Amino acid sequence: MNERLQTLLDHVNLAHRETWEVLAHVKPEDQDRHVYSTEGVEWKVRDVLAHMADAERGLPGQIRRLLVGKPTIPDDFDLNRWNRGAVRKRASQTYSEILADLDRAHLETVSALAAVDVADLDRVGRHPSGKMLTAEGYFRRMADHRREHTADISKAIHPSDTGAG
């Protein structure tokens, strides 16, 4: 594998391993803890996990569209509406089921990355955030997104933790 692709794969896999250590050990009594509120909607630990699983599930398709020159998301895409709907759709799933979906999404991401030609890593498309990102940027953003939300979950479960260690 090309060194650039390997570095990117290592970044994605490291984010998965680091966050899995937190996410896979969330206790049942912590799954309904408040993480934050946005636009009048309360996000609990399981909601944030559902959001991450949905985001990572969609990534490979967006990248495939980017690589063939198609729009990655519709022009009228509303990220907040999408996120609320994605969480609602997973309301009947257990935490364990969502966690398993996140793991499958990671494997799909790894597979998508393995199929990318190194020359295509610089192709640009519009990310759901509205930012223009390269294909490499999409993969990096996914890993960073997962780390950010896992830190949010960890802080909600352990509010007195200072992060020192």
Image (cartoon, grey):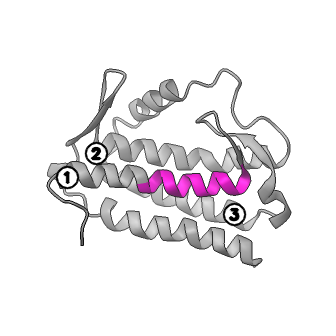
Q: Nearer the viewer, mark 3 or mark 1?
A: 1
- From the image, tell me which residue sits under label 1: 157
Q: Is residue 139 magenta?
A: yes
Residues under numbered marks 2 and 1 in contact, where contact means CB atoms less than 8 Å apart: yes
Q: Secondary structure at mark 1?
A: helix
Image x and y of residue 113, in percent:
69, 63
| Residue at left offset 49%, top offset 50% | 145
Image x and y of residue 101, in percent:
46, 53
Quadrant containing the N terminus in the rendered view: bottom right
Local crowd size for mark 1, using a 10 Å CA cut-off: few (<14), some (14–19), many (≥20): many
Q: Nearer the viewer, mark 2 or mark 1?
A: 1
Q: Secondary structure at mark 2?
A: helix
- From the image, tell me which residue sits under label 3: 113
Q: Is residue 115 above or below residue 47?
A: below
Local crowd size for mark 2, using a 10 Å CA cut-off: few (<14), some (14–19), many (≥20): many
Q: Is residue 47 above or below residue 160?
A: above
| Residue at left offset 65%, top offset 38% | 131
Residue 38's label in the rendered image is none
- From the image, tell me which residue sits under label 2: 45
User: What span is colored magenta in the figure?
Assistant: 134-147
Residues under numbered marks 2 and 3 in contact, where contact means CB atoms less than 8 Å apart: no
The type of residue carrying mark 1 is Ile
